[in-house]
Image: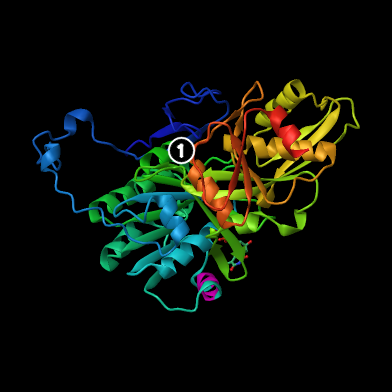
Amino acid sequence: MAKVKKAFFCTSCGTQHTQWQGQCSNCKSWNTLHEEVLQATKPKAWQVDTKAPLKAKPIRIQDIAVDRLSRLSAQDQELNRVLGGGIVPGSVVLVGGEPGIGKSTLLLQVALAVTGKVVYVSGEESEQQIKLRSARVTEESSECFVLTETHTQSLLHHLGALSPALVIIDSIQTLHSDVVDSTAGSVSQIRACTAELLHFAKSTQTPVFLVGHITKDGAIAGPKILEHMVDTVLHFEGDRNHVYRILRAHKNRFGTTAELGIYTMAQEGLKAVSNPSALLISSESVGLSGHAIGATVEGIRPMLIEVQALVSSAVYGTPQRSSTGFDNKRLNMLLAVLEKRAGFQLGAKDVFLNLAGGIRLDDPGLDLAIMVAVLSSSLDVAVPKGYTFAAEVGLSGELRNVPKMEQRMQEAAKLGFERMVVAKGVKSVPKGLELIRLATIQELVSHLF
Ligand code: TYD
Ligand code: MG
């Protein structure tokens, strides 16, 4: 009888260990080793036939024929842009996100919209449930096949027979393969199933989307190696209490990771937001103190965003500094600069900061808008109407130029803003927008308040 081989896998880095130990010797994390059953028999090194015909041959790079990567359109401009201009043939895209954020909805919408045959494989919902969902998001009929198969080998058999233009797997954690004996969702199952799908994608040039569950710390569940295996890793995020859903690329072999896709979750499924600024700025806040509009850029897309701040006297001994959507450390730094360079005593004040719409950004160009919002709340003086801000603030209180000023200005002018406060060094003269060039935050204080 063949001996059953077992091994211990680290759930955080995927390293295989022969014995259980409390700490993974590779990534040093504690309590992450889990026992899994491996294949019973494996050929030994000396049993491998080195004379067998080889599949891959070395080839000169200039001799490799490329049929110009003709990308498949996802029929969704946001997703297309995040992927770098459409779906690359043969690519494997992993989409991760919290439960209930809308991963299945997003991918079902793609499945229904893409031209050509699409196979939507679901291990989580029944055919009827998928039908109900599809009836909610679209009325059109399409060439979308639903398959509720979780056995990888049978799945590949069906895919081979249908030869679809796109395959969607919801989710990789529900698949199981004969190659390994452990249960579905375990580290070695996820790795084996992904490897088989990867082979299918590369050998047939069919793009594959995988839905991946995430752990409670926000990482994609399963081995870290999963993220290395696939071509693109997308995260679908957002607050469940907010309507906005943001699609970000964490890794992309075929495009930039700076792009951002914004959706709103409506009754009829996800809707792409083509003009986020209009939604992120509310007209009700004009004339209230503690509000400032920052001109920011995510990837190549400019956005105007409302920064809200509240400064109040601290109730407890240690003042609180809390920010939603922006780095807390950077907020603390900006407050220190205000205190030291502009003489505002904020040491005994609570400061709360919020970027509207539940969006999270780390553009240094927002520094100025944040400072203005804090100053405005602290002085209880509203920022005059029609002002936007785009500059980084240095430690000596100097304003610095930020990249992509042209786009920021265009967006501000398009949305009807009249003035933009920028750093001294900005050269360009935009149409329909007055630039106010300032060197330091002292100048800003005397200009605005
Ligand atoms: P779902 O795609 O099932 O999330 P995931 O696959 O990431 O777990 O999304 C479920 C949520 O989306 C659910 O809370 C209800 C909401 N939703 C709508 O608001 N409108 C819709 O048309 C659909 C299909 C879902
Ligand atoms: Mg789902």
**Compared to 93, does 166 lie above or below?**
below
Judge whether residue 133 is colored magenta.
yes
Res 132 → quadrant: bottom right
Q: Is residue 435 visible?
A: yes
Judge whether residue 122 is colored magenta.
no
Q: Amino acid at mark 1?
A: Pro
Task: Tell me which segment is drawn in magenta.
Answer: 129-135
Res 47 → quadrant: top left
Secondary element at tag 1: loop
Q: Residue at x 48, y 21 (%)?
A: 25
Residue position marked by numbered label 1 in the rendering: 223
Of residue 312 and residue 441, the one placed in the foreground of this image is 441
Of residue 149 and residue 445, the one placed in the foreground of this image is 445
Left or right: 64 as drawn, with respect to 179: left
Tell me residue 403's x, y (percent).
49, 37
Tell me residue 131's x, y (percent).
50, 74
Magenta stretch, overall SS: helix
Q: Residue extending furthest right?
A: 315
Tell me residue 172's x, y (percent).
45, 51
